[in-house]
Image (spheres, grey):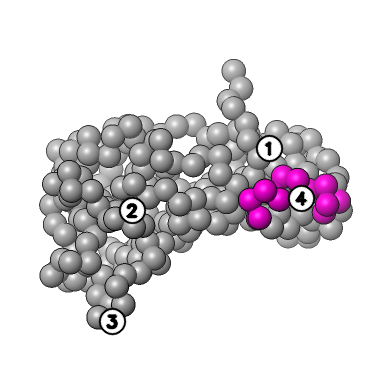
Amino acid sequence: MNKRSFFIVGKHAVLEALKNPNRKVLRVFLTEESKKNIHRESQNQNLLKDVKVYFKNKKELDKYSGNEDILHQGYVAEVEHLDSLIIKEFIKNKTNLTFACLDEVTDPRNIGSIIRSAASFNLDGILIKERHFPDESKLMYKSASGCMEYVNIFKVSNINTALKFLREKNFWVYGFDAKSKTKFTEVEWKGNNVLLFGSEGFGIKKHTEKYADFLVKIEINDKIESLNISNSAAIVFHHIMKSKK
């Protein structure tokens, strides 16, 4: 049975979907120039093999992204969802894992940027509440710049239940809170960890904070109230990657 399909736009989003053997690409809409670019940049791979390709001009492709004001760059694809991942199965027989957990983070651009950073710095996955994950958002795919294909996304029905389960499986949960007195750079990042980030405007919910073993902060200029969540995540992911090496 086929899965539900949807459209993604943007050069990197479409190219990486074509490269992913686990991603079913049903149709690709390209300009003549973008087709030439695909052949130029992927000379050793026939990325368009077994894919229906339709040639359109820029104006015809605008209808796929015009309402959201996203640049399609001459690349549009109709794809199916990847298989859902189950965290209980994923963590079996694995150690030294690092997950990010997004509590009430809903902005597709921020989520896409966090996914891009998670792929860049080799995080093992991202937990997010299923109903808050915009899994067909063109903006999220464009912001992730192709990295949707390389990050394990665990969509959970309840964040608190997921955190409780991971704590029982020997994970430490670190909540990021600007009011904490502990700098996250002072932590010795070993073993299994969950990095808990709150919403863009309100931070970690009180009843979710109870599932954090520690609260830590990113040290920034005292005159600045806070960092954008995607910037915060990138800083943290990079530091932890270096520490775990």
The mark found on residue 57 in the picture is none
Check disc 2 and give the amino acid type: Ser
User: Is the residue under label 4 in contact with that under label 1 (CB below 8 Å)?
Assistant: no
SS at mark 1? strand
Distance between the alpha carbons at the discs numbered 4 and 3? 42 Å
For the residue pair 106 and 27, the one nearer the viewer reads as 106
* Image: 245 above or below 122: below
Q: CA distance from mark 2 to mark 1?
A: 30 Å
Instruction: Answer above or below: position of 194 versus 187.
Output: above
Instruction: Tell me which label, 3 or 1, sits earlier in the chain.
Output: 1
Range shown magenta: 57-70
In this rendering, the label closer to the viewer, 4 or 3: 3
Which residue position is annotated with label 1?
78
Residue labelled with disc 4: 62
Disc 1 packing (10 Å; few <14; some 14–19; many ≥20)? some
Check the picture and name the quadrant holding the N terminus. top right
Q: Tell me which corner region of the image, top left, top right, bottom left or bottom right, holds residue 203.
A: bottom left
Q: Earlier in the sequence, mark 2 or mark 4?
A: 4
67 in the magenta segment: yes
Task: Give left or right: position of 194 versus 18.
Answer: left
Q: CA distance from mark 2 to mark 4?
A: 32 Å
